[in-house]
């Protein structure tokens, strides 16, 4: 019981420190671009039918894909304590190799470059 209370106290302390740092550290000086309601770089007064770069969508989808894979790898340390590591480690290693091969494939084909 004391371990749970100790971990809860550490969690509250770390969250408090991060919250205070998030309010104290950033500079709050804004300019016209940051104070405008459209921070995406588009001029809100022009036509909404301007061509949009496909690269933006490609990079966003790749980010979501790798973010999802990290979320799938997140419970591995806890799973190692519960299950047999001799089966969990090879499966996770194969998973990470497939991820790395996908990243190398995208890198070689230029999918990670913002501008051509």
Image (tube, grey):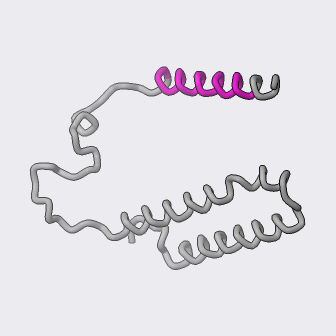
109 or 24: nearer the eye? 24
User: What percent of the width, then of the height, locates residue 61?
Assistant: 44, 65
Q: Residue furthest front?
A: 1
Quick check: is 9 in the magenta stretch? yes
**Residue at point 60%, 74% (across, down):** 102
Where residue 70 sits, quadrant-wise, is bottom right
Above or below, comparing residue 58 to residue 41 in the picture: below
Q: Nearer the viewer, residue 26 or 16?
A: 16
Q: Does 84 lie within the magenta span?
A: no
Horizontally, is 102 left or right of 83 in the view?
A: left
Residue 25 falls left or right of residue 89: left
User: Which residues are the magenta region?
Assistant: 7-24
Q: Main secondary structure of the magenta part?
A: helix
Which x, y percent locates residue 98? 67, 74
Q: Is residue 11 left or right of residue 35?
A: right
Q: Percent x, y for residue 96?
A: 70, 67
Give the quadrant of residue 12: top right
Taking the spot 61% from the left edge, 55% from the top edge, the residue there is: 71
């Amino acid at each position: 019981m004391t371990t749970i209370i100790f971990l809860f106290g550490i969690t509250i302390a770390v969250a408090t420190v991060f919250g205070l740092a998030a309010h104290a550290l950033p500079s709050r000086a804004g300019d016209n671009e940051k104070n405008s309601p459209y921070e995406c770089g588009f001029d809100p007064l022009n036509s909404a039918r301007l061509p949009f770069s496909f690269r933006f969508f490609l990079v966003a989808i790749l980010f979501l894909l790798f973010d999802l894979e990290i979320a799938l790898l997140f419970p591995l340390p806890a799973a190692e304590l519960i299950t047999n590591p001799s089966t969990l480690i090879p499966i996770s290693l194969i998973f990470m190799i497939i991820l790395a091969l996908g990243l190398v494939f995208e890198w070689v084909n230029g999918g990670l470059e913002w501008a051509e």
